[in-house]
């Protein structure tokens, strides 16, 4: 079992007692390293102010003090710090004080004249035992909650995947939904799909564990947003997609349904950007009723979501606003791709390439060809460029496969454009300059909230391609690199002066204190609090 450190605080109006206790903790540090004195106060009011600020694990306090006695102070503190352990020192062994101490749930009651160190040792050991037990129970409860939540989402995901594939008959689905408290499919409902934008970058930047955590968070935000609009449910579907259902009791007109879907979709887009910094698009199917229609409701939403391929980020789509596809333009677009391949040469400039791809983008925007046809044509173009400019010492297997599956059309085209420029100039290390510039941009803006898109824009590369290139060059994802640099900055700051947690977060541009602590421990092995204690010990030697 890992030995924990415990912070302690003294409250007493007698200077001699405070000095005696300070000496006690100083001597204790040589034989019992887990208890650390972090502060002191000479009355109850000052004690409350400092204790609420420092949140120590153990408080050692006198009873009789001016302005506020120790027991009154403890009664107030217990409301804010329920797990802090309190040890009372007193020169008065009266029944009244003992009765009040018991009522305030004080852990130990020690006569301080004369002060017996063995009593203090025993009281601190007892406090540590209680704190350990509280911590253990909290961790067990948290672990149980996480386990229940994970199982809930896992079962729900499997249920809806089988449901939309038509593998669960309606009567079984209804029984199962009763147990999940999702019995709203007998009312009117529509299915919707939430798709993560820039998913290739997301996969490059986050570890598998962090991806799963973010997906749980995304599911929660979607579901809470749906519940605010009425009744509904949401779950992780697969890879970059989530599925949800919005339900309503009374019949609605087409116009009312359209308005409700647009409003809910906009809220989901806004909330995920605001709370998790994730960009998504939302597609709705038409209204349905009953378990028998689930598969059809999903198919409609799935068909509408195909339009995301030609959209920018953060869009809401409904059946009333579908694209008209021009698959008859396939052959003509193939000729354009072939002409581009013939014309591109090793001496091509960035500007010339961008002009060529802008023309391809304009044609595809004017004459939309369905993704199932367009995406394979772009994949073939990527491979043809490799074969045309392949150098004698470069095997095709060394070239990364075109990450086509989760990219929108513009992403795919931008990725090929940036890749082509690098590849036709093979051997000149063109993009070393872009990576160096990105690192300078990160260094310059380290105290800000940096995003992959902002850095990619600064170096004039497509986000997905820049993310892939950075990881290939640096052996580290962009977000991981930024976080490491932010923690390095935090360490430099802590070595200069004692910043509070909030001040550190502000200085390094991380809004969430919990996330900062997680990153700090991940990179240093200690929490900021533990690191400060170690630094204090080191400086005192």
Image (cartoon, rainbow, N blue to C red):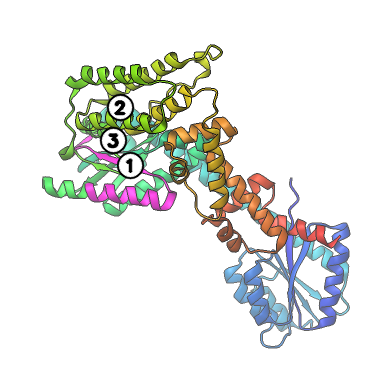
Task: Tell me if residue 131 can be seen.
Answer: no
- Residue labelled with disc 3: 308
Q: Are marks 1 and 3 in contact (CB under 8 Å)?
A: no
Disc with the residue nearer the chain's start (2 vs 3): 2
Q: Looking at the image, which residue sits at the far left?
A: 253
Q: Quadrant of residue 246?
A: top left
Q: Position of residue 311 (x, y in %)?
A: 28, 37
Please tell me whether residue 288 belongs to the stretch shown in magenta.
yes
What's drawn in magenta, residue-wise?
A: 262-291
Residue shown at 20%/40% (left/top)? 318
| Residue linked to disc 1 | 313
Q: Quadrant of the N terminus?
A: top right
Q: Residue at x 65, y 63 (%)?
A: 499
Q: Which residue is mark 2?
A: 168
Mark 2 Cα-neighbour bin, 10 Å: few <14, some 14–19, many ≥20: some
Q: CA distance from mark 2 to mark 1?
A: 34 Å
Q: Are marks 2 and 3 in contact (CB under 8 Å)?
A: no
Residue 382 or 10: which is nearer the viewer?
382
Q: Is residue 391 magenta?
A: no
Quick check: 7 left or right of 293?
A: right
Lower position in the chain sequence, tag 1 or tag 3: 3
Left or right, 260 with respect to 155, comes to left
Q: Is residue 81 above or below residue 509?
A: below
Query: Which is nearer the eye, 223 or 240?
Result: 240
Quadrant housing the C terminus? bottom right
Look at the image and tell me whether residue 167 can be seen: yes
Please, which residue is most extreme toward the front here?
347
Secondary structure of the residue carrying tag 1 is loop
Q: Is 510 above or below relative to 304?
A: below
């Amino acid at each position: 079992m890992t030995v924990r450190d415990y912070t302690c605080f003294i409250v007493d109006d007698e200077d001699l007692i405070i000095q005696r206790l300070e000496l006690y903790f100083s001597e204790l540090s040589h034989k019992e390293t887990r208890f650390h004195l972090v502060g002191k106060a000479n009355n109850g009011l000052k004690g409350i102010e400092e204790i609420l600020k420092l949140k120590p694990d153990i408080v050692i306090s006198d009873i009789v003090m001016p302005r506020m006695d120790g027991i009154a102070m403890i009664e107030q503190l217990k409301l804010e710090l329920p797990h802090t352990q309190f040890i009372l020192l007193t020169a008065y062994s009266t029944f009244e004080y003992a009765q009040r101490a018991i009522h305030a749930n004080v852990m130990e009651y020690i006569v301080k004249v004369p002060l017996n160190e063995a009593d203090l040792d025993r009281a601190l050991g007892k406090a540590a035992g209680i704190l350990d037990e509280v911590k253990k129970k909290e961790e067990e409860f948290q672990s149980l909650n996480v386990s229940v939540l994970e199982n809930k989402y896992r079962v729900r995901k499997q249920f809806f995947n089988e449901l939309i594939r038509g593998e669960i008959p309606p009567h079984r689905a209804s029984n199962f939904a009763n147990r999940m408290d999702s019995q709203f499919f007998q009312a009117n409902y529509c299915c919707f799909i939430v798709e993560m934008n820039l998913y290739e970058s997301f996969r490059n930047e986050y570890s598998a564990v962090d991806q799963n955590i973010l997906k749980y968070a995304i599911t929660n935000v979607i579901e809470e947003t749906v519940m605010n609009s009425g009744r509904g449910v949401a779950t992780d579907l697969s890879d970059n997609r989530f599925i949800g259902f919005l339900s309503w009791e009374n019949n609605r007109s087409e116009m009312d349904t359209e308005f409700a879907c647009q409003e809910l979709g906009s809220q989901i887009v806004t909330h995920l950007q605001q709370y998790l910094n994730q960009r998504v698009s939302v597609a709705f199917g038409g209204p349905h009723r009953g378990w028998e229609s689930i598969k059809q409701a999903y198919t409609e939403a799935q068909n509408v979501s195909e339009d995301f391929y030609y959209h920018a980020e953060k869009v809401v789509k409904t059946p009333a606003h579908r694209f008209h596809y021009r698959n008859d333009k396939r052959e003509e677009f193939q000729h354009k791709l072939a002409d581009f391949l013939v014309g591109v040469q090793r001496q091509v400039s960035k500007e010339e390439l961008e002009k060529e791809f802008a023309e391809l983008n304009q044609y595809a925007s004017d004459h939309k060809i369905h993704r199932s046809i367009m995406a394979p044509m772009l994949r073939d173009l990527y491979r043809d460029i490799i074969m045309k400019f392949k150098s004698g010492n470069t095997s095709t297997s060394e070239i990364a496969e075109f990450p086509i599956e989760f990219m929108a059309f513009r992403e795919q085209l931008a990725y090929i454009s940036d890749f082509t420029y690098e590849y036709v100039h093979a051997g000149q290390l063109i993009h070393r300059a872009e990576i160096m510039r990105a690192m300078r941009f990160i260094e310059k803006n380290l105290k800000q909230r940096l995003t992959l898109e902002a850095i990619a824009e600064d170096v004039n590369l497509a986000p997905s391609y820049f993310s892939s290139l950075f990881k290939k060059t640096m052996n580290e994802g962009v977000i991981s690199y930024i976080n490491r640099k932010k923690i390095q900055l935090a360490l430099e700051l802590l070595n200069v002066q004692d910043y509070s947690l909030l001040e550190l977060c502000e200085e390094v541009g991380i809004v969430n204190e919990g996330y900062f602590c997680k990153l700090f421990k991940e990179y240093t092995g200690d929490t900021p609090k533990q690191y400060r204690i170690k630094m204090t010990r080191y400086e005192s030697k």
